[in-house]
Every structure is written in C-alpha cells, then in structure tokens.
Amino acid sequence: MRSLISLLKRSLECIRKLIKKIRGVQFKIMENPELSKQMRRVVSNAKKELWIICPEITQRALEWLLEDVDRHLNINILTTTKSKRAVENALRDLDLMTSSNVFLSDVLHAKIVMNEREAVISSANISARALWIKKIGSIELGLYVHEKQTVNSLKTFAKSVIDGRQLPKGITINGVKLVYGPKGLSDCLIDLLRKASQEMYIVSPFVGMEIVDQILDVINKKHIRVELITTMKKQDIQIMLQDLLAIERLLESGVNIRRLNKLHAKVIVVDKNIGVVGTFNMTFEGIYENYEISVMIEEPSLVKKLTKWYFSILQLSKCVRQENVDSLKAQLGEQMMEMIRMRKTEEMKQEKFKETVIEKTSILPTPLELAVEELLYDQKSKTRVWTDFKTAQGRIIPKGTNMKIRIIVQNRSKEITLYNIRLHTSPNIKLSSEQKTIEKLGPADRKTIEGIVKFPDRENERVIYEVRASYYDPSLKKYRRTYPNRGLKVTQTMITWKRCVLQALSKTVDELEKELQRLPLLDEFKRRVNEKFPPGIVDAIKKAFPYLKSVDPSSDRFWNELFMIVESYRRRKRYNET
C-alpha cells in the first residue's frame, strides 16, 4: 500500500514537471542586459498585436526595439506628451505610422512591453541608457510573464488608462499578484508595512518625505530594521526628484542608507519571504498620483532570487553619512540664496518700472494652504514678532538658537471638508506626534500649530527647514499634497551686550586663574573687576543681566551670582571647544 502511494506521488510529480516543461517558464526575474534582450524577443514574437507602455521614449531606442517587428502588426504605444514627437519620428522612419496607434497620458509611469501571449514589466524606460544599447547603462530590473490571464489583465489596465476608466483589480497567479496604482499601490504599501516583522529592504532611486513618514511610523512601532539603496545625484535634488530632507530624516532614525547613482530599479523585500518588483518610486507621486504597476511576489524561488539580487547591488553601493547630506545641503543652500537674490532683484525692477506680472496658476489649485511664520526679534519695535517665512528668508540668526515657528493650516474651499491631513517636516523641526495629524478640516476652517526649529552650534551654516502636508480630497477621491514651504537661515555668532560683558569677565577670570594657579576666590574676583574696569562696569552688568538690577552691587550676593554666571559661560565655552 505504501509503495503504491509513493508511486502515485512520483507519477504526479512527473506529470507536474511535464506540464511545466510544455507550458514553459511563467514568471522570471530579469536584469540587464538580459532584460532588454527579452523585451526585444517579446517584440519579435508578436504575431497579431504589440503594446508598448512607457512614459519616456527616445527615438533611437524605439527604432532599435522595433527594428525586427512584423510590418502587419497592430502596434499600440501609450506614452506621455513629452515623448510624443520622438515616438512619431521613430514610427515615420520605420514606416509603421499606418499600423500604429499612439495614446497619451501625462500621469503614466508604468513600463510594459507585451504581445498577445507574453509581457515584460520592468523599471526600464525606452532609452539607450535603460536598454543598454551601448552595452552598458542603468541598473534595471523586471519580470518576464508568460501567462495568458496576466497578459489579458495588463491589456485591460492599458485600455482603462486610455479610456479614463477605473483601473482593474489585480489578479493573483501562482503566488504572483499584479497591483495597479495609484489606488492599489497605496493599499499594497500599507499591507507590506503591516506584514513586516523583522526587516525591510527598499530599492528606490527617489524617496519622498510623505512615504518616509509612513515607514518611520512602522519602525518606531515594530522596531524593524530598514535598509535603503537610493541615488544621491545633485541634479535630481535640484529639480526635486530626490528629497534630501527625507534622506536626512531616515538617517536620523537609524536607517542604513546606501547610494548607487546608476540605480533605476524599484524593489521591496520584506522579511525575505515577500518581494515587490515594480515601476513606482517611494515618493508621493509614485504611490498616490501616477499610473503605476507593481508585482507582489510570494513564490519562494522568485523571492529568493530577488533577495540575492538585492545583496549583489548592495556590494556595489556606498554608505551615505550625515556629512554627505550636509555637503549637498550646502550646495542647495547656495542655490536657494541665489534664488532669493534673484527674487529681490526682480521685485526691485518691478517697483522701478511698475511692471504688471501675471502669475500662472495650476488648473486644480490645492484647497489646502500652509502658511509658516517665524518668531523673530524686530529692531524697530524691540520685541519679538511673527514674521512670514518668505520675508525672513536668508536672515542671520544666533547659532544654537531654538526658533519658534507656527504653521497655519487653512482650508480655502468653502464647500469641501478635507480629511487625514498630515504634516511632513524636516528633522530640525520638532513637533509632537499629535500635532502632525489633523483628522479633518471643514470648509474655510484653519488650525495653528506651534513648533521649534533647532539650529546647530556651528557658524556660517546655511540651515534649511521644510514643511509640507498631504491630505485626502473627497472631491477628487484621491490623496493630494501641498507645495513645500522652505525656510533658509544662516547661523552666526551674534555680538550682543550680554555676550560682550561675559567675554570680558571670562577673560578676567582666565587671567586670575593663570596667575594664582587656581580658581580665584570671590573677593579676588571682585577686586580685579573693580581695578581693571571703569566705574560704569556695574551699570553694564545690570544692563546685560536685568535680574541683578534689584540686587545691591556692594553685597556678596551680587558678586556671587555674577561669578556663577561667568563660570557657567566658561564651562559651556570649554565644552564647545572640545
């Protein structure tokens, strides 16, 4: 009986292997240069129709990809307005205009090449660098699919984008699940963060503050280990593709960050048993706005290969430290200072020539508005006043200052209630967790939140701080975000009356200590101050320290408290020097 059961098991295994062999490989993880070769094979294997879905297409790369294509094919290309001219030129040169359809969507970010039976989902754009036309290029990763249901689902996704209809629900085949964004992607990310228990490996060329805050929430609650491989290119930071302040927040939270500037692949591995390959970056646009596609993988052999790939590129990457961020921030600060100078020059020109400037507004302006104000000392009124952060841009402030700010969150709409409002701030802004979230904000409502910006004890440092918000807009049935409000300050040692008095008295104690080879006594300190300084020194001390005005200058209490103040200053000075 046992031998019969074992024989049946072996027979079933043989049948399963035979079916798999006949059917061929259904899913396969691929990297360059094999990835671009497979994309070309999918094009050449097309018999009836071909779909190319990609936001960035260059003429040369498309001509290379369609070089051996069947001229009688029905070719459908879905791209963005930016790539329209390059696509049309390539189709014209290849004499494929009559058999091709070109569709446009400016929020497209998915990348798919497919025929009627097979497809490649990848991070690669149709460009020379991504397809390794020059035998070398960016680091890309993709999934080869040879499964009818999956290919049909991908076609439904493409047609839904073209027609502006609701995206299809993802399907699951043999431990591989297709997820379409933006709606499915945000749910997928929340599900991954919920399932994570030990570690999470993230590969994303760009990261955004809004997504980073979600990841940090999980780290703080579950104490899981997170590693990130990303890019740190100056040009990406300048055009706001890469969020430098998000990287700084991750570093502050103890996340191990590595940089690899050739990287363009998008991967997540959770606890080495769930993997995600896709087209989305870990940014607000990638998760909440763009048409994206990701593949959640739970099939053990594919997850194992994905994990192995992660550790292979980990060896190619370099560690990101705070000094790398500081260097790039300094360059960004220079750029912001130049923008401030240009803005002031432009304002002077407008005042001089009385020109009328017509500002362009977006088609759908965000109903949520953030106003940031700083509590700064005003020379005219001799008091601290709330100043708009744009007015105070680039101002010099004392090093080591804790500057108070207030963030005014305003719903400009008179009809819509906004939900799930979350503030995202740079690491040098301190807000409590309760202050960072607002459940809802009714029409024309506003809320004021106070916080502190901490500045370092270093001179001549350009300190940038940033505040932005994300929220759910029920009128559009999607998540949106505000533009970032960035403040810029330069730290400097401010010479005040109090500092002058402290420096003079501290120098006096230093001289006495050197002469006596010990700390001077109170009488010795009093005698030396009266000998060294003119009679007006007592008035100067009272001006510097107002709380000593009510104390008799001839009493021991006056000189004892003064000596303690000077000693405290000397200790702080020695600590800063070390």
Image (cartoon, helix red, strand yellow):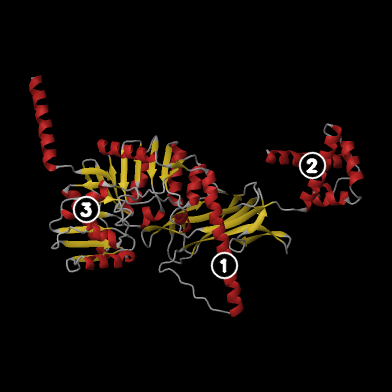
Label of residue 342 in the image = 1
Q: Residue at x 59, y 70 (%)?
A: 345
Q: Nearer the viewer, mark 1 or mark 3?
A: 3
Label 1 and label 2: CA atoms lie apart by: 45 Å
Label of residue 566 in the image = 2
Q: Amino acid at mark 1?
A: Met
Q: Nearer the viewer, mark 1 or mark 2?
A: 1
Q: Nearer the viewer, residue 339 or 315?
A: 315
Looking at the image, tell me whether mark 1 or mark 3 is earlier in sequence order.
Answer: 3
Looking at the image, tell me whether mark 1 or mark 2 is earlier in sequence order.
Answer: 1
Q: Position of residue 489 (x, y in %)?
A: 61, 56
Q: Secondary structure at mark 2?
A: helix
Q: Nearer the viewer, mark 2 or mark 3?
A: 3
Position of 278 with respect to 417 (left or right) is left
Q: Position of residue 481 (x, y in %)?
A: 44, 58
Q: Nearer the viewer, residue 313 or 4?
A: 313
Q: Secondary structure at mark 1?
A: helix
Label 2 and label 3: CA atoms lie apart by: 77 Å
CB under 8 Å between discs 1 and 2: no
Question: Quarter of the image holding residue 383?
Answer: bottom right
Residue 167 is at least partly visible in this image = yes
Q: Residue at x 13, y 35 (%)?
A: 17
Position of 360 with respect to 72 (left or right) is right
Q: Position of residue 267 (x, y in %)?
A: 34, 45
Q: Position of residue 541 (x, y in %)?
A: 84, 49
Q: Nearer the viewer, residue 51 or 479?
A: 51
Looking at this view, name the residue that lies furthest to the front. 134
